[in-house]
Amino acid sequence: MSFFNFTSNEIIMQVTVSFNKQMPLCGINEKQQKTFFDTSREFQGTESAASPVETVLEALGACSMMDIISILRKMRREPLSLTADIAAQRAKEHPKVFTSIEINYRLECAECSPDDLEKAVALSMEKYCTVAAILRNSGCQIHWSSEII
C-alpha cells in the first residue's frame, strides 16, 4: 500500500531519510546512493556531515554548475575548472529561511570570454536551475557574479 496519492502526470521522485539512535541522518535515493545530514553538538549532533540547510546551498551550487558546464560545452567551450562560492542570509525568526543568496562563479576555460560565462550563468539561474527556482519561489533573492581565472 502506498502512502502517496499523486494525481497528476508530474515527475515523481522518492527518497527515504532515516534516523537510527544517533546522528547523522541517512538519506537514500532510488539508486541506493546515500547522503548524510548532521547538526552541531549543541543539538545532539556529531558534526560529521553537513546540515540539511547547508546542503540546500550546496545543491544550489551543484545544480547551477551542472547547467553552466552543459551550456558552455554547447557553446563549444571546454571548462577546466568551475567553482561557486556561496553565502546566504537567513531570516531571524523560525522558520529561518534564506532571504538572500550571493554566488560568485570562478571559471578556468582557455577559450571562454567573460560574456560567454555570464550568458551561461544567467541561463542557468533564470531558466534552468531547479534549485534556484525553488529558492526564488520561496521569496529568496539570488545575486551572482562571475569571473574568468
Image: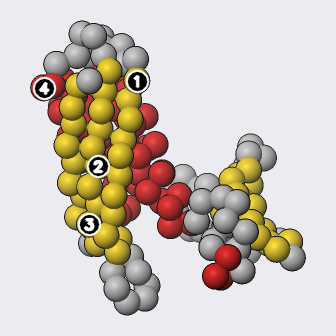
Give the Cα distance between marks 3 and 4. Answer: 25 Å
Q: Distance between the residues labelled 4 and 1?
A: 17 Å
Per the image, label 3 sits on a secondary structure element best described as strand
Q: Distance between the residues labelled 1 and 2?
A: 16 Å
Figure quadrant of the C terminus: top left
Identified by mark 1, the residue type is: Ser
- Disc 3, disc 4: CB below 8 Å? no
Amino acid type at circle 2 is Ile
**Percent position of residue 36, x then y:** 70, 57
Give residue 3's position: percent from left, percent from top.
73, 74
Q: Residue at the location (54% across, 52% down)?
A: 11
Which of pointers 3 and 1 lies earlier in the amino acid sequence? 1
Q: Is mark 4 on a helix, strand or loop?
A: helix
Kindly identify which numbered label has been placed on residue 103: 2
Occupied quadrant, residue 115: top left
Count residues near mark 4 (Cα–Cα under 10 Å), then give few for <14, some for 14-19, many for 20+.
few
Q: Are marks 3 and 1 in contact (CB under 8 Å)?
A: no
In the image: residue 138, left or right of residue 46 = left
> Disc 3 vs disc 2: Cβ atoms closer than 8 Å?
no
Amino acid bearing label 4: Asp
- In whole angstroms, how far apart are the C-alphas of marks 4 and 2? 17 Å
Among the two numbered marks 4 and 1 on one chain, the one whose residue lies closer to the N terminus: 1
User: Circle 1 is placed at which residue position?
Assistant: 81
Classify the position of the N terminus by image quarter. bottom right
Q: How crowded is mark 2: few (under 14 residues within 10 Å), some or many (20 or more)?
A: some
Question: Which residue lies under the disc numbered 4?
Answer: 115
